[in-house]
Amino acid sequence: MSDMITADLVDLDLSASTKEAAARSLAERMVALGRVTDLEGFLADVAAREAQMPTGLDGGIGIPHCRSAHVTEPTLAFGRSAAGIDFGAADGPADLVFLIAAPAGADDAHLTILSSLARQLMNADFTDALRSAGDPATAAALIRGDEPPAVEPRSAETSSVAASSVEDEGAPSDSVSASAAASADADTAPASGPAPAPAAETERSERPFRIVAVTSCPTGIAHTYMAAESLENAGREAGIELVVETQGSAGFTRLDPAVIAAADGVIFAHDVPVRDKDRFAGKPTVDVGVKAGINRPAELITEVRGRAARGEVTAGSASGTPVERAGDSTEGYGTKLRKWLMSGVSYMVPFVAAGGLLIALGFAVGGYKINKAPSVMDHFVWTQSGSWAALLFQIGVVSFGFLVPVLAGYIAYGMADRPGLVPGFVGGAISVTINAGFLGGLAAGLIAGGVVLSIQKVKIPASVRGIMPVVVIPLISSAVVGFLMFVVIGKPIASAQKGLTDWLNGLTGSNAVLLGALLGLMMCFDLGGPVNKVAYTFATAGIAVASPSDSAMKIMAAVMAAGMVPPLAMALATTVRGKLFTHAERENGKAAWVLGASFISEGAIPFAAADPLRVIPASMLGGAVTGALSMAFGATLRAPHGGIFVVPLIGNPFLYLIAIAAGVCVTTAVVVVLKGLRKPAPGTAGPGTAGDAAATATAQQTKQPVAA
């Protein structure tokens, strides 16, 4: 750390009264040494980091820090305040202030050195030595580690420092802290001559209790390493073997699988998801925030030992579910249910697209009687188009056969992660077998996920923990799901599925037109969001059979036509009335032509994000017109995707294109009128404005080629 802090970067008489003034005073020293190129820009980055969460630590420490493009090399400045400065710590002002400046692209080696400061802050001898340092050179040497603290050693309990609110800043885990085991052996080694074994050693009889831990937090200079140090100290104090894996955002070194396998318990102290968490499945686990690892390590050790003694293996020992990793732990059940269902749908859509397009191409090449062709295993002539058409059709049918099992499997995956896949797929396959279809797949997925979560909460003997994820959970959950689907709920769901199919087949006249309008409204409401996906899934479920009904193909046609309207309309609007749009929106409009023609509704998101009150209602109106006209014209579609490129596969293609054109014109007209009524704010129209920059950023963040 010799190149990071020098005596010139130390102020032992910091006179600032606020954290902003303290940061400025220390940053000015960095500017004077050429470590920071733009004082105000750097301080803005520090303030932005501080706004995310206070950077004060209990124990009188403030550690403002940031990554900044205005920093030329990793730098650490230190200030000591006699009056104290409020950095938001629970126990009051800080008298020791460390300002850490990291370049935007700081390399791993420098960040690793910076992380060592966090471990030093857990040592009260180190902080006491800084408080008593008589000159800047001595303080800088202490921080660099050139001089050991000249203070009497203290116990691990006394030297632990509680932290309240600083997060990590991306420091990598350069190594796994495996020294705890050796230290424990040294601390508990008997003196020469016979001595009675302590009670704790008698209880362990053969070996010490073993714990593996993982610490992590969002950004990477403080909490990850402070929690690791605190847990290691508590482990030595308790006479156990405790090994920590620190997961910084720039990377980490995995614990040896043998160490994990030999562990008796696991502690997760983290504020971001633990990576590769399933490595620790099947062991008693305590899962807490990173601050708990710093503030109460002894309690965590006691808790995990208690769980091991009781044979408790909770769901927390497996990796967090996809829904939990993507959302807030405080989300309500309704929000989680929607995400579980969308998890299944998102994995199902590629099977639908691939299978549907292959089947549609088979029909296009070989005609609609191609579904009667013999298996290409028995009859395939390389020079006959009919054989190739049959091949495309039969591959598509096989792909479609995965639709319901994949839907059910990944709904269960969203609920319970990988243990949910087996019962989910089994339940989905049973749904296909008993003709429960799409509705049966939804039910099977939810049941499978619920069964797995219930099993994971059961207390089990230590002897069977290792085979739980591989044998016990798949066996029991599949049996339960299979029983429920075959015997209890399968028949009622199959009857409901048949009733829905018969209702769709009976739609004619005004009822069909109204359904088309409703589906058009849904497709254009959130442009690829949950409501859009509900309409799209409803349509694809109808054609996900070898011989779909005419009504199902009409619904698919209406849905795809309506989904093409918003991006095409925005592209047309930016062409005919470009002055109503910013330069960035006009550029997005060029891309929207292709996205809309490809049935990618998300092409309109940049416009909707910038002006939702005008764009979304206009899009919904045009989508409703297109959906209604498509149904009225009797257009049919066997392919679930493809946009303008599958028009040859559409029934009544000319009228279908008219329906799309009508909706695009309606949306364009409404958008132009609504935007024309708005008085643009000065400086927001035309190229090169702040509005353009915002629109460009929105477009870059939201424009993704996701189906429908």
Image (cartoon, rainbow, N blue to C red):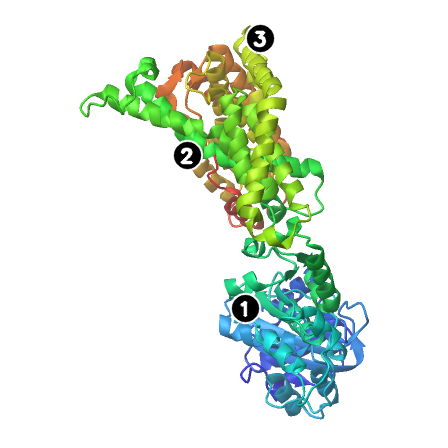
Quadrant containing the N terminus is bottom right
Please tell me whether residue 617 is drawn above or below residue 57 in the rendered image: above
In the image, is 153 to the left or to the right of 410?
right
Name the residue carrying label 1. Answer: 173
Q: Please, what secondary structure does the residue beneath circle 2 have?
A: helix
Of residues 698 and 99, the one drawn nearer to the viewer in this rendering: 99
Of residues 706 and 248, the one drawn nearer to the viewer in this rendering: 248
Give the numbered dot on residue 489.
none
| Contact between labelled residues 2 and 1, with CB atoms less than 8 Å apart | no
Name the residue carrying label 3. Answer: 510
Q: Amino acid at mark 1?
A: Ser
Please tell me whether residue 269 is drawn above or below residue 552 in the rendered image: below
The quadrant in which residue 201 appears is bottom right
Give the numbered dot on residue 594.
2
* Image coordinates for residue 296, horizontal then vertical, percent: 75, 67
Q: Is residue 251 visible?
A: no
Sequence-earlier tag: 1 or 2? 1
| Contact between labelled residues 2 and 3, with CB atoms less than 8 Å apart | no
Report the residue that reaches farthest toward the left.
383
* Image coordinates for residue 649, horizontal then vertical, percent: 36, 20
Of residues 336 and 179, the one drawn nearer to the viewer in this rendering: 179
Residue at x 60%, y 20% (from the top left corner): 493
Q: Is residue 160 visible?
A: yes
Q: Please, what secondary structure does the residue beneath circle 3 have?
A: helix
- Foreground mark, 3 or 1, reads 1
Q: How much space separates mark 1 and mark 2, taking CA atoms?
A: 45 Å
Q: Amino acid at mark 3?
A: Ser
Sequence-earlier tag: 3 or 1? 1
| Contact between labelled residues 1 and 3, with CB atoms less than 8 Å apart | no
Please tell me whether residue 374 is drawn above or below residue 159 in the rendered image: above
